Image: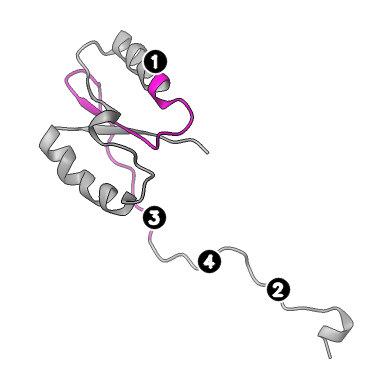
Amino acid sequence: MAEQMGIYDVVWPSGERRQKIQPLAKRFDTLNGKTIAQLWDYLFQGDEVFAELESEIRKTYPDVKFVSWREFGNTHTTNEKELLASLPQRFKELGVDAAISGMAC
């Protein structure tokens, strides 16, 4: 009867929260001596963006190191799930301390 009158049940559009909010990782005091991985989905112009980011970051932190996006390949590809799952081990092997993930829509 209510539906015939134009009255409908309303639900919240967001799903139920299934994971607790985690605290943020401790921030570095400096990037000097750190190694930063670059991750990219091969869209937009990440090659140019990462070159510019490297240049600008090195002005403040001359002893920072970068692992190029070329090392990891396209992060938005057919084997995306496996590639992303392998990152912790790859980061460990490469001595990565932090990552910049560039993506475009």
Q: Eyeballing the image, is 15 above or below 31?
A: below
Judged by its main secondary structure, the magenta piece is loop
**Which element carries disc 1, helix, strand or loop?**
helix
The residue lying furthest to the bottom in this view is 1
Q: Mark 3 points at which residue?
A: 21
Q: Do the residues labelled 3 and 1 touch (CB within 8 Å)?
A: no
Tell me the CA gap for discs 3 and 4: 15 Å
Q: Is residue 76 left or right of residue 35?
A: right
Residue 31 numbered tag: none
Q: Do the residues labelled 4 and 1 touch (CB within 8 Å)?
A: no
Q: In this view, does 79 lie to the left or right of 42?
A: left
User: Residue 51 appears at what percent x and percent y?
Assistant: 36, 17
Mark closer to the observer (3, 2): 2
Tell me the CA gap for discs 4 and 1: 39 Å
Q: Name the residue under label 4.
A: 15
**Which element carries disc 3, helix, strand or loop?**
loop
* Residue located 25% across and 36% down the image: 72
First along the sequence among labels 4 and 2: 2
Mark closer to the observer (3, 4): 4
Q: Are marks 2 and 1 in contact (CB under 8 Å)?
A: no
First along the sequence among labels 3 and 2: 2
Looking at the rendered structure, the kind of residue marked 3 is Ile
Q: Mark 2 points at which residue?
A: 10
State the image quarter where residue 66 is shown: top left
